[in-house]
Image: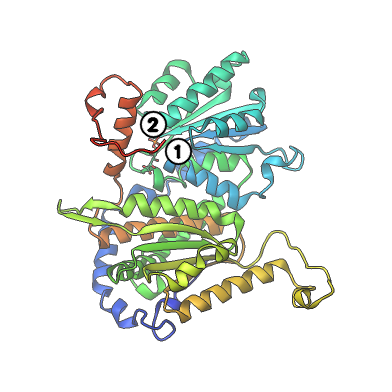
């Protein structure tokens, strides 16, 4: 039970020009310091407060009466929800009848202000049977505020009581959502103040919508708890999170500035998107902890196997050798399709085989080709997509990100680079108090119409 990790193709002699075990050995002391510092100042995300589960469970009966939960959030307040939904529910969940869903809710995650997108979600739900789950830690994010106002006016237009159709997940004290909730008696859950958005999937942020669609949230925590414990092991070669951080760090130093995560399962694509945000926003930093300019980070890229073998793999095999690739491999699929017998040479080798066997063979072929071409790659292996395994995945990568942040000597928990753009948006939309940000960026226009 649990995830398996295969780091073999990051190392010599499997990988020509790859890492040598001595390079890891040489970092044991440094990694030990990283682990000690982590244990001393244990970040809240890694504490897995049992109250995160119990506070969500308090709404278990209430949420059962809704046919749909529409999550309104963005970034760390949405990507985990989407990852859980796609990985742990059938891909056609939102198209199934309520009976087929055992009465659990459909879950839509609206994480953009694209009117075509939001309107198409609203078309698919009946407001009378819908709960709008507004998630914003700060309670100031423009996209979420805009989408909340749309949902709010819809609920009011139907003559419904907002107290019965909204649940806010927000900071326990600050922000406009908290204020509205206090004034109007709208139900709330807390984003723990010490947990940043992209580290919050295992808090009520991710747990509530997961519970609403029937995902076992206790198992999610059980997997995460085991992974966190394992991530504190000082035997580096037995610690997956330390190995991920250290190998990615050493390869970054060797010029692998891109980290590709390639899932061989459509149900895992949003796990990859979740990782993309975590790795990008946590590690992409201008300054180190001493305030020196470092412009560090490793650009995460998403790929889907086998689809992107016909799009990206040429580049990965023969283009610049600047990537470290992680495969997400699923050994047992929920559904299976056996290929029918067909006449002709082009079909013979396929006849009678499982579609999953073809996908797994494609993954192996890609991995071996990359290895032969000197392209470092590793595997995270899921025997099945279960809440326990997905909980492990989240926790291992959160831990690895924290460790990588320490190795890079940056603060992985802030995002100053996002702030200026947010303020400029406020200024362009005419928000009071932001006028001074409205600077003329284009001194010279070069446009084609
Ligand atoms: O990880 C983060 O901190 C960000 O991606 C935030 O989650 C995102 O900006 C949304 O912020 P908020 O939850 O305050 O609306």
Of the image marks 1 and 2, the number of the one nearer the N terminus: 1
| Front-lying residue, 441 or 192 | 441
Residue 367: percent from left, percent from top: 52, 74
| Front-lying residue, 222 or 177 | 177
Instruction: In the rendered view, tell whether residue 20 sits above or below residue 312.
Output: below
Q: Residues within 10 Å of mark 1 (few under 14, many from 20)?
A: many
In the picture of the structure, the residue carrying the numbered disc 1 is 74
Q: Quadrant of ligand 1?
A: top left
To which quarter of the image does residue 427 belong? Answer: top left
| Front-lying residue, 213 or 117 | 117
The quadrant of the rendering that contains the N terminus is bottom right
To which quarter of the image does residue 247 belong? Answer: bottom left
Residue found 64% across the figure and 33% down from its top = 68
To which quarter of the image does residue 406 belong? Answer: bottom left
Q: Does dot 2 land on a helix, a strand or a loop?
A: loop
The quadrant of the rendering that contains the C terminus is top left
Ligand 1: does it lie within 8 Å of the C-beta at label 2?
yes
């Amino acid at each position: 039970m649990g995830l398996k990790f295969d780091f073999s193709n990051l190392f010599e002699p499997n990988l020509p020009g790859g890492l040598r075990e001595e390079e890891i050995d040489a970092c044991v002391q440094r990694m030990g310091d990283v682990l000690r510092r982590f244990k001393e100042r244990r970040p809240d995300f890694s504490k897995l407060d049992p109250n995160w589960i119990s506070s969500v469970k308090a709404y278990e009966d209430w949420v059962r009466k809704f046919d749909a939960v529409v999550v309104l959030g963005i970034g760390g307040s949405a990507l985990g929800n989407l990852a859980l939904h796609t990985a742990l529910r059938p891909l056609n969940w939102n198209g199934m009848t309520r009976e087929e869903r055992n009465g659990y809710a459909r879950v839509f995650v609206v994480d953009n202000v694209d009117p075509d997108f939001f309107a198409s979600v609203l078309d698919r739900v009946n407001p009378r049977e819908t709960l709008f789950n507004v998630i914003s830690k700060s309670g100031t994010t423009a996209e979420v505020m805009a989408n909340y106002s749309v949902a709010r006016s819809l609920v009011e237009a139907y003559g419904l009581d907002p107290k019965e159709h909204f649940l806010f997940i927000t900071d326990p004290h600050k922000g406009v959502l908290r204020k509205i909730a206090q004034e109007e008696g709208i139900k709330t859950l807390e984003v723990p103040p010490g947990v940043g958005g992209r580290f919050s999937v295992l808090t009520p942020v991710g747990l509530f919508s997961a519970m609403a669609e029937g995902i076992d949230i206790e198992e999610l925590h059980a997997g995460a708890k085991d992974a966190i414990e394992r991530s504190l092991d000082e035997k580096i070669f037995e610690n997956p999170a330390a190995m991920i951080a250290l190998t990615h760090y050493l390869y970054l130093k060797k010029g692998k500035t891109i980290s590709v995560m390639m899932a061989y399962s459509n149900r895992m694509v949003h796990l990859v998107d979740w990782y993309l945000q975590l790795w990008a926003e946590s590690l992409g930093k201008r300054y180190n902890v001493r305030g020196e300019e470092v412009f560090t980070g490793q650009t995460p890229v998403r790929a889907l196997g086998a689809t992107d073998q016909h799009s990206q793999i040429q580049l990965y095999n023969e283009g610049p050798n600047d990537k470290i690739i992680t495969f997400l491999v699923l050994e047992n699929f929920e559904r299976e399709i056996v290929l029918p017998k067909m006449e002709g040479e082009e079909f013979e080798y396929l006849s009678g085989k499982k579609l999953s066997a073809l996908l797994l063979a494609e993954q192996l072929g890609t991995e071996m080709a990359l290895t032969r071409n000197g392209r470092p790659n590793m595997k995270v292996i899921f025997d099945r997509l279960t809440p326990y395994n997905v909980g492990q995945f989240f926790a291992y990568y959160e831990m690895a990100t924290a460790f990588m942040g320490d190795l890079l000597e940056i603060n992985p928990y802030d995002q100053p680079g996002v702030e200026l753009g947010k303020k400029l948006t406020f200024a362009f939309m005419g928000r009071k108090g932001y006028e001074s940000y409205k600077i003329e960026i284009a001194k010279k226009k070069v446009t084609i119409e």
